[in-house]
Structure formats: structure tokens, C-alpha cells
Amino acid sequence: MNPSGPSVDRGPRRRSVVGGLALAWGPSVWGSPRPRVLRALVESWPPYLVPGADGSVRGLDAELLQAICTQAGFELNWIHGSAQWRKRRYRELLNDQFDVIFSATPVPGRERTVMYSRNYRNETFMVAATDRRDPRLDGLSGFEQVLQRRVPLLHVDALSLGADFEDWRPRLAEAGLLLPYQTTRQGVDMLRLGRAPLILGDDLDVQAQARVSGVRLLRQPFGHSVQPVCLMLSRRRLDERDLTRIDQAIQVLEQRGALAAIRRRHGAT
């Protein structure tokens, strides 16, 4: 992916409000308030973000964010940029390229530069394999056996991949058994090519990419974890009042069951 970062289209600052009450950037030349805009980056991340040929963005996180923005009175503005490595998104957020990162886990020490919303969905991780004939996988039931049998493991290059894995991560890394991947397509391709017999990643994400790549996954009886995630919001354009609006919107939509209905429709919790 392009290491120089995306060239983004910031889009118009004043457009129609999606719904609800608009927050103001300040008075316009006509004396009417301008809608508060939340900029999200268009990425191909099925089933969470699925760009359409017509410029629309579908998917679980796209629908959840649209519902939250509508309730909070924000205009959701999708901006286009080059595909990025996972770790580069945070730097681009700080450089004011966009305002939000999905599926975030709060990291201590970042409070001065970003804000974290309430939880808006859960993230589920799983361990899967493809080859039933690998004798190292026979009766495999935990990361302790992964270490004992020296089974290489592909994993998404991120933190907080489940308490069980995190307990074993240092020892697996020291043994040279961990192979990180930046994108799920990369990880599934490495699995398909035999770089490792096991992959740890986001359940829905890995399964979606496996279907596209024609890879049959065999879910393993360990490595399953469910943890809440939130929206990471930049402080470059947004402030505590914006965070309050977004948190209130999430709370109201949860109470109404609106977010749960979207999650169910996409097979998520």
C-alpha cells in the first residue's frame, strides 16, 4: 500500500444535514448555522466497509456510523484516499486527513490527541486453519500446545487480540512462531500459500476474505474472544461537546434497539 499516505478529497464544508439537530461550525455568511461534519475514510473492509461503484459505502460499520451521525445531527462525509496500512491510519488521523477510526480499543496516553466514544459494537476474534492433514493440528486445543508443537501462527498486526492470546503472545513471539499481517487479504493469502497453518483475526473479516479467496476455513476450539470497540475521534476538528453528542446518540440508538438491528443484519453482536 502507498506509504506516502492518501491524497484525500476534503469535500464541501456546507451540505444538507443528514438528520437531527446540526451543530454549528459558526455562523455562515447568510447567518444560518453550518452542519457539523464528520469525515470518514472510504476503505474496502468487508463486511464492515464496502465501497460501491456509485460512490456509496455499505457495510456494518458504514451503517452504524450513518445511524449515529443522523441521531447526533452530524453530516457524514465520506472521503477517498489511497489504501493504507493499518498503523498508518492513526498518523493520518492526527494529520487531519479524516476524523474517525472504526473498531478502536482505547490506548492509555492518547487522550491529548484523540477521544474515544462509547462502545458501538463488539469485535470477535477467532483462530482458524485450512489443512486437516497437518499432524500438528490434531487435537490442538490451546496456545500452550501451539507453543509446544511449534506451530506458526498468522495474526493481525494489532493489540488486544483476546486475553488468552495476549497471555501467550510474548512466549510465542520469543519462539519465532508469530507472523503478523497488515491486511486480511494478505493474511488469508499467506494462509493459502502455506506460510502458516493457523490464522488469528477478526471473525467476520477473515471469513469474508476467505470466501473471496476461495479458502475453506476450519474454526479452532480456542482463541475465540469478544470485546467491545469504540470510535476513535480526532481532536483536530472535534471537541468534548461533539463526543457528548456522539455518545448520547449511541446510547439512544442502543435503547431503541436500532444499532442491534443493524448488527444482527450483518451477523454481528
Image (cartoon, rainbow, N blue to C red):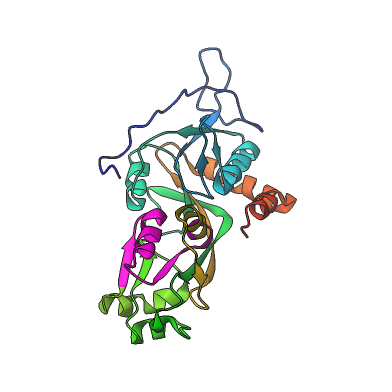
Q: Residue at x 53, y 78 (%)?
A: 221
Task: Give the x, y percent position of residue 76.
Answer: 54, 34
Q: Residue at x 51, y 22 (%)?
A: 14
Residue found farthest to the top: 30
Task: Give the x, y percent position of residue 110.
Answer: 37, 54
Foreground residue among 77 and 124? 124
Foreground residue among 10 and 128? 128
Q: 5 above or below 252?
A: above
Image quarter (top left, top right, bottom left or bottom right) of the N terminus: top left
81 relative position to 54: left or right: left
Tally of numbered tags: 0
Foreground residue among 140 and 236? 140
Residue 217 covered by magenta stretch: no
Task: Give the x, y percent position of residue 41.
Answer: 44, 39
| Magenta-drawn segment | 178-206
Task: Give the x, y percent position of residue 50.
Answer: 51, 43
Foreground residue among 31 and 195? 195
Q: Residue at x 65, y 39 (%)?
A: 71
Query: Is residue 108 visible in the rendered structure shown here?
Result: no
Query: Is residue 112 visible in the rendered structure shown here?
Result: yes
Image quarter (top left, top right, bottom left or bottom right) of the C terminus: bottom right
Residue found farthest to the right: 256
